[in-house]
Each structure stands twice: as C-alpha cells, then as structure tokens.
Image (cartoon, rainbow, N blue to C red):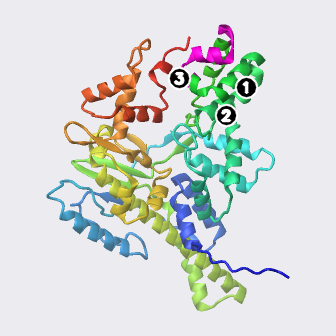
C-alpha cells in the first residue's frame, strides 16, 4: 500500500518581471545592447527610441521640465524629495552632488577602453569539451564572474546557486564543483583554484612531459605533503624529510618556482573594448555625471499595434498574438526603465560618498561599503551588488569599475578615514622599493606605515599583503 506524507515547505517564487529586471541590471553596456537588439527582433511590438539621455548634476542647477521616463513620474518626484533633503544639508556639507535631469541632445565623449577577452577564451575551450552543454556553460559563466582579482574562486557554491536561481535555473553543489575543476584544467591552468597549492598542483599535473620524472615526482611530493615547509622556506627540514640530495631538491624547487602563481586572468589581449556606463566631469567647481544611454538602449511599444488592438481589426489569432507580445513588451520596457533608475540612484550615491575622489583623485578614495549605499538608496545589498558588477565610470582620472569604490578603511593620525586601498598602495610602493637582498618584514612594513601616519596592527599588514598575493619577506628573496 503506498505511503503518503504531508510536508510543509517555504519557497520564494520570483515573478517574471523580477527575474527579467535582475537579469538586465547585471548586464554590462555591450551585453545590454545585444539583449535589446535580440528583443527588438523577436517582438514586433517593440521599436527603438531615439534621443534618450539621462544625466546627474550638482544641486543648484535647474532641472528641466519633462519626465525622465515616458510613463513613470514617481522617480522624478522621489528625486525632488531627495534634492529637498540634501538642501537641508547644504550648509553642513558644501557642493554635495544630487540629481537633475537633462533630456537635451548634448554630446559627451565616452572613451573606449580596451578590455581583455580571457573569460571568453576559457569558455570557448570549455564548449569544445565532451558533455558540456548550455547549462554547464551558464554555470561556468557564473563561476568566472565570481573570481577575485587573481582568479581564485573565493565565493561559496551557494552564491553561484542563488545567482542561477535568479535566472530560473536549478543546479546542485556537485555541478558547481565539477565545472570549477574543469575550468581549473583549462589553458592556462589554475584559474578558479581555491588556493595557491591547488593552483600549482593543477599546473604541475598538466606539465608532466616538460620535466624529468624524478624532479616532477619530488615537486609533486613537496606540494602535496610538505607545502607548508616549502612556502616558509624550511629547506633543511625538506631535505631531511624527503631524503633528497641537494641537487635533486634544488631541481624540484626550480620546477615549482617555474610555475605561474598568477595565470593571465586579466591580461589585456586586445580586440574587445568596454564603454563606461557613466561619465563624470568636474567643471567650474561642479560635478556632472551622465548615463551612457545611447538611443538604441531605449524602447517603446509601437502605437500601430496598440491601435490594431483597440479597433479589434484582424483575426482572433492575430489579436491574441498582439496581446501576448504586448505584455512582454511592457514588461521589457518597464525592466529597462527600472534598470536605468537603479543605476542613476547608485551613481548619485557614489558621487556623494566619493566626492573627493571625483574632484581630487584616487588618493582621496574613502572607505565605503555596499551596506551604506543600500541604506542611502533604499535598495537591497544584492541589488547594489548586481548594479555595480561589470559597470564602469569614466572620470578625469581614468576609467574605473564601480566595485573599485568599495573598500574598508582605518583612521590616520589626523583622525581622517582612509580607504584600505590607499593603505595597500602604500604597502606595494614600499615593497617595490625595498632592497632585494634584504626585503622588508611585516614588522618593518608596519613601522613604515606608522611613519606615514597609519597606525595598523602587524596582522592587518600581513592580511593586506596576502590579499595582494605578495609573499612574506623570506620568499621575496631568490631561493638559491
């Protein structure tokens, strides 16, 4: 007799509109343009709108009349309330940036910046492998998009799974790990490794034919079983544990040091360019930011099809076709408008919190967390994360990814908040200028930073050094 059980579960279901909005928000400019072109080809009720451009200026400039979007005026009203709120703070903080909107046809120069195509190279290799279909490629795209600056996979599988669910796709942790290990063995090997040891081992496994068997086996033994001794340069201990001659140990270590701890994850290969999503100018004491929203990136619903539906012309099938595509067209148009609104909120908040950066340069980068922007804009932290991912802003000091503006911080001797990125830059400069024969220890680096006015614990200095993938002092010497 069959057994019946009752189970109670809670499950969050996202609407089609939410999924579409999330997908469009995280797309960079080039991908968004391609996505819109695809939608224009698939849905005959959509047509491009020309002459749409949004901009942000400092408070005090007159906002032109007219709504920012054709059918949405609530954003203009909320922006007006925001300006009134900022006006109250004007005496306490001068020149605080805020929104005004310009629908004029003023042209802005957007610098084309060369961008690497490394991820696409890896995806092409992956697509040629047996058993790799659309689902596996989508998982690989999510993994590659969540690597850190040096190509390590520092996020948990849960982050990838959550992102896939937002796209309407289900997967298991085993699927994520299997795809990560496939990426690990692509060319160059070691991308998406969990740590340096795994990266070196993957490279060594794929380079067996390039080294004498005895040297290779000794190198593998060191990485697998004595990695801590190797990384801390305990060569006498290695010599005793492995019972190797000095020439053999020397050869094994030479094999390991010949590996690449930083495979070219972000090498500039040419051929691909990125266009910044925003351009921020500083002229005559005022900040002005424009959203790079080319005419092809705005759409509207065709009036011709609306009229056909109102007059009830055509067959029943034709009217059903129009109704179905009309709903899709409205959802897509609304998602685009929401994306634009969200990006404008994000750049406005960044201009407020990183005002000195935009006016005086990267040396004045302030500590900033996504939580602060979320509280300032009223958006979720996950929305902020998707909004800044892969987005760029062109400033008078160069083009920067929006994620660059987020970092922790400390106070210097003068009580000013200083971004951890500035501290890391000072560390890098001190290490690059050190004597190669006598590299600076963490204690010496700590003392050097203290002399510059930054009172930081030695363990914090060590953490920053490790985050920059800079080895300890004894490893910065030549091994032999």
Disc 1 is placed on an element classified as: loop
Label annotation for residue 232 = 3
* Mark 1 lies on residue: 207
Residue at the farthest front position: 240
Label annotation for residue 78 = none
In the image, the segment drawn in magenta is 230-248
Cα distance between the residues tagged 3 and 2: 24 Å
Up/down of 211 relative to 26, above or below = above
Circle nearer the N terminus (2, 1): 2
* Mark 2 lies on residue: 189
Residue at the farthest left position: 91
Disc 3 is placed on an element classified as: loop
Q: Residues within 10 Å of mark 3 (few under 14, many from 20)?
A: few
> Along the line of sight, which residue is nearer the eye, 57 or 254?
254
Q: Residue 328: image x %, image y %?
A: 60, 75
Circle nearer the N terminus (3, 1): 1
Q: Is residue 376 left or right of residue 52?
A: left
Q: Is any atom of residue 260 visible in this view?
A: no
Up/down of 455 relative to 226, above or below = below
Up/down of 16 relative to 198, above or below = below
Q: Residue 28: image x %, image y %?
A: 52, 53
Q: Is residue 465 left or right of residue 254?
A: left
Q: Quadrant of the C terminus?
A: top right
In the image, what residue occupies the spot 55% across and 34% down? 268
Circle nearer the N terminus (3, 2): 2
Q: Is any atom of residue 478 visible in this view?
A: yes
Q: Is residue 458 left or right of residue 231?
A: left
In the image, what residue occupies the spot 76% across and 16% down? 214
> Along the line of sight, which residue is nearer the eye, 291 or 407?
407
Q: Residue 353: image x %, image y %?
A: 30, 52
């Amino acid at each position: 007799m069959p057994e019946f059980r009752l189970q109670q579960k809670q499950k969050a279901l996202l609407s089609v509109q939410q999924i579409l909005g999330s997908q469009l928000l995280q797309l960079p400019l080039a991908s968004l343009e391609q996505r819109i072109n695809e939608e224009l080809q698939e849905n005959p009720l959509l047509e491009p709108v020309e002459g749409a451009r949004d901009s942000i200026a400092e408070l005090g400039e007159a906002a032109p009349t007219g709504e920012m979007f054709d059918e949405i005026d609530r954003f203009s009203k909320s922006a007006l309330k925001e300006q009134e709120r900022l006006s109250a703070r004007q005496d306490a903080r001068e020149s605080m940036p805020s929104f005004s909107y310009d629908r004029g046809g003023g042209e802005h120069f957007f610098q084309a910046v060369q961008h690497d195509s490394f991820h696409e190279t890896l995806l092409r290799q992956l697509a040629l492998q047996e058993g790799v279909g659309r689902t596996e490629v989508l998982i690989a795209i999510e993994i590659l998009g969540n690597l850190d600056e040096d190509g390590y996979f520092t996020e948990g599988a849960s982050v990838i799974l959550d992102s896939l669910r937002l796209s309407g796709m289900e997967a298991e942790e085993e699927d994520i790990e299997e795809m990560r290990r496939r990426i690990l063995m692509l060319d160059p090997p070691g991308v998406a490794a969990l740590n340096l040891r795994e990266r070196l081992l993957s490279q060594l496994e794929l380079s067996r034919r390039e080294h004498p068997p005895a040297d290779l086996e000794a190198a593998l033994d060191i990485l697998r079983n004595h990695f801590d001794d190797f990384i801390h340069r305990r060569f006498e201990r290695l010599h005793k544990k492995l019972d190797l001659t000095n020439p053999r140990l020397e050869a094994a270590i030479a094999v390991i040091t010949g590996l690449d701890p930083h495979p070219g994850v972000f090498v500039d290969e040419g051929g691909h360019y990125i266009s910044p999503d925003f351009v921020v100018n500083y002229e005559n004491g005022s900040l002005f930011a424009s959203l790079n929203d080319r005419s092809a990136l705005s759409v509207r619903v065709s009036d011709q099809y609306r009229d056909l539906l109102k007059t009830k012309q055509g067959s029943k099938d034709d009217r059903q076709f129009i109704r179905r595509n009309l709903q899709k067209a409205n959802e897509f148009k609304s998602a685009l408008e929401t994306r634009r609104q969200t990006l404008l909120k994000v750049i406005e908040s960044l201009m407020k919190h990183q005002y000195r950066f935009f006016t005086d340069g990267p040396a004045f980068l302030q500590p900033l967390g996504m939580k602060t922007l979320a509280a300032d804009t009223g958006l979720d932290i996950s929305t902020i994360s998707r909004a800044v991912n892969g987005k760029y802003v062109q400033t008078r000091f160069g083009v920067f990814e929006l994620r660059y503006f987020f970092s922790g911080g400390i106070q210097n001797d003068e009580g000013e908040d200083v971004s951890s990125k500035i501290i890391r830059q000072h560390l890098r400069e001190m290490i690059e200028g050190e004597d190669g024969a006598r590299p600076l220890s963490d204690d010496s680096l700590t003392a050097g930073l203290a002399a510059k006015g930054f009172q930081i614990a030695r363990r914090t200095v060590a953490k920053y050094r490790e985050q920059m993938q800079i080895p300890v002092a004894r490893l910065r010497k030549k091994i032999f």
